[in-house]
Amino acid sequence: MTAVLPERPGTRTGTAAVPDLLERLALAPADRTAVVADGRARSFGELRAEAMRIAGRLAARGVGPESVVALCLPRGAELVAALVGTLTAGAAYLPVDPKLPAERQRYLVEDAGADLVVTAAEGTAPLADGVPHVTVAALAAPGPELPYVPVAVHGDTLAYVIYTSGSTGRPKGVEIGRAAASALLCELEGAGIAVTEGGRVGWNASPSFDASVQQWVRLCRGDTLVMIDDETRADPALLARLVDEQALTDLDITPAHADPLLDLLTPDGGPRPLTLLIGGEAVSPALWRRLARLGERGVLRTVNLYGPTECTVDATAGWVDGADGPHIGSALPGLRTRVLDEELNPVAEGGSGELYLAGPRVGRGYRGRPALTAERFVADAAGEAHGGRMYRTGDLVRLLPGGRLAYLGRADGQVKLRGHRLELPEVEAAVAAVPGVAEAAVVLRDDVHGAPGLVAYYRAAGPVTEAGLRERLTAVLPAYMVPAAFVALERFPVTVNGKVDRAALPAPAPAPAPAPAGDSAAAELTASQTLIAGVWAAVLGAPQVGPDDNFFKLGGHSLLAIKLVSRVRAELGVSLPVKAVYANPRLRDLAAHLDTLVAAAASPNS
């Protein structure tokens, strides 16, 4: 069997032919590095050979166009090979992050109607009724070779299904065709974003999020994918080191993660061949100004990207410069933006309205949800879009000069938190489903332990505790959707119309500090514990911290852990890895670990 991916006819978007992703991938030099993962580099030749073996074995199982293959694999070379192999077989992939709760994994596989689940090891497949599973090793193992004849695909053939949070309480799967995915890569190139020949691109997004698509498609133009593991992704110091050691040219990152990284990326202010692709949430004016200054000095360049999953990841792009404040730029070539008022009339420059997106990269719709598809994918008001449809984003924007857009917020219950898109009604439904909860409401607040976070308000109809709520929700929701704080109410405030008055919901109480026994908590602390306690108090907004306090029980989460290690580095001059916070969540244990690091740094042999 040849190791070269089969040639496929170019797909079409609108009137312009767009080469299929695999057609472009087949042109990458065989000896060029395709994937770097776990300390090993794999060439394009090796990747193509492995993908062909996987495609042959998938085809032997009856997998082909419009089949859905669930990939329950962590970020790594095996995921890349399985993804490319699935597309080579003409099928679509469904990413299922192994870190998701088991119930969530099962739901994704069953709701999508997956034909097969690919896992990293035996016994790790989601418990989906009647869905066969196989390990990626079994699919990719050398010989005996199976005859494989490439099947015909076209632009509308399903490429992937990615699930997003659902307003009905159930996640919904977005269907994207092959031509749309191919066009995304062409438009990133056309907009001057993906320009470096043989670039080195960091893949740090969960495969279950659409930002991962923007990262892996770069492979198909001959760029090298550098896989970023969870430990490195969560630790600014490790991530900055990887950027340098792997000479990354492109890094996709959320604003919340970019802020603590910048000090480490540019300690001397010298130039570097790095493009930051900022997206997932709004960029603050302070961060925008900082990035603009770095761009003006030629240190690095930054582009702000915006786009919903339903329109193939990125819809607009705007270079971060000092001329204006934060904006999301203008439409990429394959999409057209329309800013419409409530009567679907275009707004004038300077006006605000809801953003609609039209063009060939608008997705096929929601898998198995025809009514919801009809609600969000509506007739194109101007009658020019491919298929006559446009996607109603629910995002409010202001129309700026030159067609640029300023993001204003949401028109519904959807929010963005630490780069994740989620629907508040889905979280509310999960809280309300907990035994003992009679009524629930969830809001996003800016004052949860000193940082934005979800707050769940509930009225109890039986015995229920915060610990019980958190445990139950952790079992059914991704970690980023579990509320950071819970507030019990005897009754909910309501408006004159009888609806929950969300604006009147009380702020959560500050994180409780333990009552010290005998002497004050401060008297119980050693010198190093006092230093850590001060940092914790600043990061968590806790008025009092004791030696037996737990960082996460006081409201800490992944972003606050990153802020914690950055603060320790700035105040104490010690590089504390984020994983040390997770391994030592109790204050006295973290302080002891810090003492060990300080002693090691002071050792003449260090």
Image: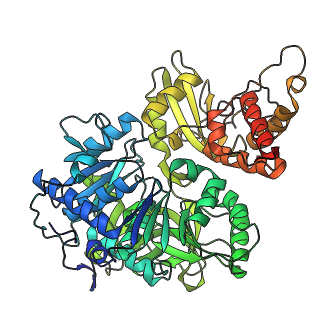
- The residue lying toward the viewer, choosing from 412 and 327, is 327
| Count of number-bearing discs | 0
Q: Position of residue 84 (x, y in %)?
A: 29, 62
Looking at the image, which residue is at 46% across and 66% down? 307
Q: Position of residue 571 (x, y in %)?
A: 83, 49
Q: Quadrant of residue 338?
A: bottom left
Left or right of 176? Residue 394 is right
Asked if 459 appears above or below 456 in the picture, the reply is: above
Looking at the image, which residue is at 37% across and 46% down? 171
Q: Position of residue 258 (x, y in %)?
A: 64, 61
Q: Is residue 510 visible?
A: no
Left or right of 291? Residue 483 is left
Looking at the image, which residue is at 21% across and 66% down? 157
Asked if 101 appears above or below 420 in the picture, the reply is: above
Q: Is residue 476 visible?
A: yes
- The residue lying toward the viewer, choosing from 446 and 30, is 30
Which quadrant would the N terminus be assigned to in this image? bottom left
Left or right of 156? Residue 285 is right
Q: Quadrant of residue 595?
A: top right
- The residue lying toward the viewer, choosing from 578 and 561, is 578
Q: Position of residue 487 (x, y in %)?
A: 63, 30
Looking at the image, which residue is at 35% across and 40% down? 105
Asked which colour scheme the image uses, the reply is rainbow
